[in-house]
Amino acid sequence: MAPNHGSLLYEGKAKCVFRSDQDEKVFIQFKNSATAFNAIKRAEFEDKGRLNCQISSCLFELLEKQGIPTHYLGVADDCWMVAKKVEIIPLEIVLRNIAAGSLCKETPIVKGTELEPPLLDIYYKDDQLGDPLLTDVRLEMLKLITPEQRSTLENLARDINFSLKLFFNQIDLILVDFKLEFGITHDRRIVLADEISPDTCRFWDKRTSDPEARILDKDRFRQDLDHVLEAYGEVLKRVQGACAKPQKCL
Ligand code: UDP
């Protein structure tokens, strides 16, 4: 059941953000819609919103316990998260532990190559421009963040990767790569925002070596493979088995 939310603040491809009765708190609704290739490919998956909301909530709680500041306050219902209101920094921080996806399309690096240290790529979050990869100089020119904020953000992203990689390894999932977004709270603090889910991460199942069966993320949708929801459900089952139940918050 939807919580008692206020007006719509923002609608994205996978989530809607609503006002609450407090200025610094929002309700985030996770949608069932899936998009890929800059929204050229679209579909609806019944229950995807709940799966992503619950997976993200468990992971945000895990990171909070490890001292990572996030926007997360709690879950309100199956597909509703309660979060601090933030101004999203229009950058997508991608951490790569294993080469896949665009890295292999754009370079001769072979899919499956281990990247040590992990590769951190920064993209400009702009659908109309197709989220371009930024160079150091272009990032400086854009002046979206100060050099201090950049190093805070990169250090946080690397710490998050370190924690999540270990966590997923314990539940037999390889964290291949993932995308993070950060926001600035009303008291000007940088916190992890958005979501961490099979929509935004690549997970390979360590329990099988079959190159298609091991995919437990949005690549199943991108590549027209079946059992998309079952894959997301498997990720939730393993995450919940290793985490505390997310905190209810209204
Ligand atoms: N990613 C995302 N949103 C984006 C772009 C990428 O969540 O707009 C995630 C993607 O799911 C993968 C990682 O970031 O886990 C790296 O994506 P990549 O650059 O390889 O691009 P893709 O192959 O998705 O085009």
Image (spheres, rainbow, N blue to C red):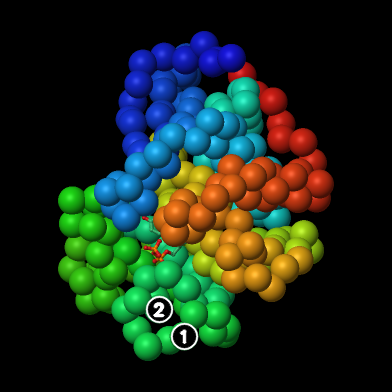
Q: CA–CA distance between discs 1 and 2?
A: 6 Å
| In-image side of 131 versus 176 (left or right) | left
Q: Residue 228's spot in the image, x, y percent?
A: 56, 47
Q: Identify the residue under disc 2.
A: 104
Which residue is the extreme one toward the bottom? 108
Q: Is 103 located above or below residue 21 in the figure?
A: below
Q: CB of residue at label 2: within 8 Å of ligand 1?
A: yes
Q: Residue at x 52, y 11 (%)?
A: 4
Residue nearest the viewer, comparing 126 with 237: 237
Type of amino acid under label 1: Val
Element under disc 2: helix
Which one is nearer the viewer's eye here, 247 or 30?
30
Q: Is 114 situated above or below 173?
A: below
Q: Is residue 165 visible?
A: no
Q: Work out whether mark 1 precedes mark 2 in sequence or the reverse, and give the earlier one.
A: 2
Which quadrant would the N terminus be assigned to in this image?
Answer: top right
Q: Is residue 53 left or right of residue 18?
A: right
Decide: few, some or many residues near mark 1? Use Cα within 10 Å; few <14, some 14-19, many ≥20.
few
* Numbered mark located on residue 110 in the image: 1
Name the residue located 57 percent from the left edge and 83 percent from the top edge.
114
Amino acid type, callout 2 = Cys
Image marks 1 and 2: residues in contact by CB distance under 8 Å:
yes
